[in-house]
Amino acid sequence: MGVPLRGLEMVNLFLDEFEALRLCDLLGLDQDEAGKKMGVSRATVQRLLTAGRAKVADALVHGKGIVFTGGDHIRMPPGRHRWGGRRGEGTIGP
């Protein structure tokens, strides 16, 4: 049985930290490749990864929730897993 979010301490993960984690840790890109996709330097990607990994580890170890903050994002309607388009295509934006 889960714990209601309102009862959890939260960790704020910025969307650029999340994107760096996704590109490097999930997709396996190196920091230079991730930086090119994100339009930032390798050093910036390294800083984002360091901060993002620390926040995710804090949430996992201490049972905290994660709140995604900063930047443009769209919440999917209930029951939807992606926006229209071909399979595997999604849209994020304002």
Image (cartoon, rainbow, N blue to C red):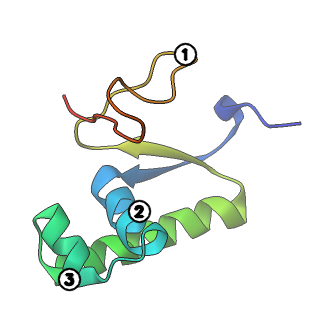
Against 78, residue 45 (above or below) is: below
Q: Which residue is mark 3?
A: 32
* Mark 2 crowdedness (10 Å alpha carbons): few <14, some 14-19, many ≥20: some
Against 48, residue 59 (above or below) is: above
Q: State left or right for residue 61 relative to residue 9.
A: right
Outermost residue on the top side: it is 78
Question: Mark 3 or mark 2: which comes first in sequence?
Answer: 2
The amino acid sitting under disc 2 is Arg
Q: Which residue is mark 2?
A: 22
The amino acid sitting under disc 1 is Pro
**Alpha-carbon span between mark 2 and mark 1:** 24 Å
Residue 78, which numbered label?
1
Where, by quadrant of the figure, is residue 49 drawn?
bottom left
* Mark 3 crowdedness (10 Å alpha carbons): few <14, some 14-19, many ≥20: some
Name the foreground residue: 72 vs 24.
Answer: 24
Residue 27, which numbered label?
none
Residue at 32% from the left image edge and 51% from the top image edge:
15
- x and y, in percent, of residue 94 in the image: 18, 28
Question: In what element is the residue under mark 1?
Answer: loop
- x and y, in percent, of residue 63 in the image: 71, 55
Quadrant holding the N terminus = top right
Residue at 42% from the left image edge and 36% from the top image edge:
87
- x and y, in percent, of residue 37 in the image: 18, 65
Q: State left or right for residue 65 relative to residue 32.
A: right
The amino acid sitting under disc 3 is Asp
Question: Mark 1 or mark 3: which comes first in sequence?
Answer: 3
Q: In the rendered structure, are the residues bearing label 2 and label 1 in contact, judged by CB atoms less than 8 Å apart? A: no
Where, by quadrant of the figure, is residue 35 drawn?
bottom left
**Alpha-carbon span between mark 1 and mark 3:** 36 Å
